[in-house]
Image: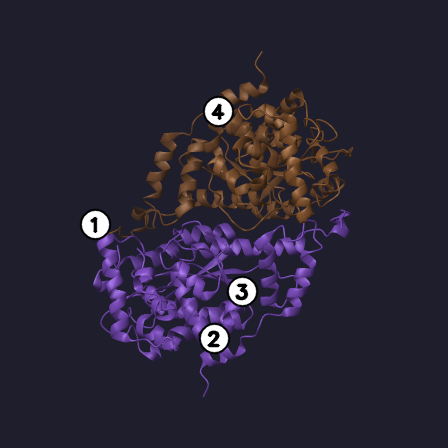
Chain colours: A purple, B brown
Amino acid sequence: MESRLQQIIARVQPLDERAQTLARARQDTLTKPQGSLGRLEALSVQLAGITGDPLPRIQHKVIVTMAGDHGVVAEGVSAYPQEVTPQMVHNFLRGGAAINVLARHVGARVVVVDMGVAAHLEPHRNLMDKKVALGTGNIARGPAMTPEQALQALEAGIAVVEAEVARGLDILGTGDMGIGNTTPSAAIAVALTGHPAVEIVGRGTGVDDAGLARKIAVVEQALTVNRPDPADALDVLAKVGGFEIGGLAGAMLAATAHRRPVVIDGFISGAAAMIAIGLAPQVRPYLIAAHRSQERGHRLMLEWLGLEPLLDLDLRLGEGTGAALGIFLAEAACKILAEMATFGEAGVSEKEK
Amino acid sequence: MESRLQQIIARVQPLDERAQTLARARQDTLTKPQGSLGRLEALSVQLAGITGDPLPRIQHKVIVTMAGDHGVVAEGVSAYPQEVTPQMVHNFLRGGAAINVLARHVGARVVVVDMGVAAHLEPHRNLMDKKVALGTGNIARGPAMTPEQALQALEAGIAVVEAEVARGLDILGTGDMGIGNTTPSAAIAVALTGHPAVEIVGRGTGVDDAGLARKIAVVEQALTVNRPDPADALDVLAKVGGFEIGGLAGAMLAATAHRRPVVIDGFISGAAAMIAIGLAPQVRPYLIAAHRSQERGHRLMLEWLGLEPLLDLDLRLGEGTGAALGIFLAEAACKILAEMATFGEAGVSEKEK
């Protein structure tokens, strides 16, 4: 029997070329020199292709922020204690975190998901419980999770997004919370890009030089111990990934299958996007990279993903903060396409031949 | 007797260091790794210093879009006919231009000013009439304007912003409209930076290779004919500038004198900022560069201004479109500072020592 994951992957279609052609043609009739709105114009055409609508409209904006813990924190790879993961989940639920502020600023709702926090969280009306386990295994010593758990994480992400699509979702932003999660994200990037750990591993929330050296050694060790197969993204996720990373990859696949644009955040969302593309390369044109993170390996990650980020503001927070800003730009692009007057409507003379 | 311009320049104060220190200290108590919101954090501190308020609030957002015509279009330096300037002013007044769409998106009001359009415009409740003349002189043959007209343009910009400050203005975005106005802007940049015209002059709204070569020659000729004194910004404005450029420079000076942040748009606003800084170097810390324009010389202009742009989206439209996006980021920065929970409030553990 086909898994839910296989069904979703089978649904992913190429972008709609007709909608893109119509959007491009309309851009060229709007009262501005052709191409003068640069990447906003290209973005509007991409959004037309994704949605299949030559005049795409973004109304319901959703940021899915997934939380999980990581056994690898035992190796001393993070500047913060693991208890911060559940503490920050509570902060999200009370509306006091950066993602809450920026989501309000752009009119998006935040969906907080427990994918595998290493603490029992009180039920809350705004918290989705998709906990796979109380944190992953320590990837420096063995696999992060079983193949069954990897599939469970992916399918949980699919279920979260399908529920949101049912409530109304025109664009998905992805976000993460998980002390230690730049380490598995770096391990995924090293496994899939083939670049050495020293070029990928960064300081995360802010480890010092000794911490950085330790983190590089831990990523190398994780790959030696686990030997993930770069041709098998599910294997990479299971061996060196994380529950929130798997959940985000599933979320991306589901949004794509439903022809919804996905604005990916920084380094952890980038690792999730690598897993999603590893499982289904046809997902790529549905992805919009919000920003270039300050985290070291993000540049090489974006290169592998084939995505050019919209923003470069030295962000390195995660949570979906960059994605929120990216959603604002996607909405701007759609409004330009839909609301600007054409040369004909405005009685403005066109370019001289 | 002191001119209004001299009075305004005398009012410009350094940034408020105490407000900056308090804002910086508060950023470091918010529930995120210190510095992890990168340029948004720095921006919030700058805004605190500008306003003198450790928790600056942006409510009234104003984009001033100034229009003017340029005698130099007689040399064939633009891809569009001069009649497009008044046509686009009408488009602004009807709300169909890109700046209207983006201003609505960020909740800003657009103030359209006729600084010197080469056509008689019907009065309109949303159009401010500050017309200095029906277009400038052809800078390839002589000065753009008289010194008296340059002063008039600057003081008109001051008056426009002071009226808006009285109505409520927490942040100013600058924008321009004027067929041919990349040519005087380039001439100003060549005069003040000392870089050769070939490194500064770009394609504007889209001239072809022959048009570009002609434009470079015209800028060189304008400098040879007029010999503007780089140590005298008023002389540069009068000899090779434009009415909307002078108006925008005045607008920047007035906003600065009233401790309001100024988000400057692209190439033409950059030229105006050069004039403003040439007149009063203490204006610089009040300026926020919204984006790096695709127009060739903008990089060198920003270097001379000492400003690092927030966005790089290949925009080259003007009107204040980039400034609108920059205003959104400035507002995001203020909200982060004001609305995020501190570690203490949220009960989140701080970084391990």
Residue receiving disc 1: B353
Q: CA distance from mark 2 to mark 3?
A: 16 Å
How many residues crowd around disc 2 within 10 Å: few (fewer than 14), some, or many (20 or more)?
Answer: some
Q: Chain of mark 4?
A: B
Q: Which chain does the numbered disc 1 sit on?
A: B
Judge from the rendering whether residue A209 lies leftward or rightward of residue A259; answer left or right: left
Location of residue B191 by image quarter: top right
Q: Residues within 10 Å of mark 3 (few under 14, many from 20)?
A: many
Depth check, front residue: B335 or B318: B318
Tag 3: residue type?
A: Pro
SS label for mark 4: loop
Q: Which residue is mark 3?
A: A261
Query: Which labelled disc corresponds to residue B275?
Result: none
The amino acid type, in three-letter code, at marker 1 is Lys
User: Which chain is indicated by disc 2?
Assistant: A
Q: Work out how far the residue at label 1 is from the one at label 2, CA to CA, in angstroms.
A: 42 Å
Q: Residue at x 41, y 67 (%)?
A: A272
- Residue at label 4? B12
Pointers 4 and 3 in contact (C-beta within 8 Å): no
Q: Is residue A18 visible?
A: yes
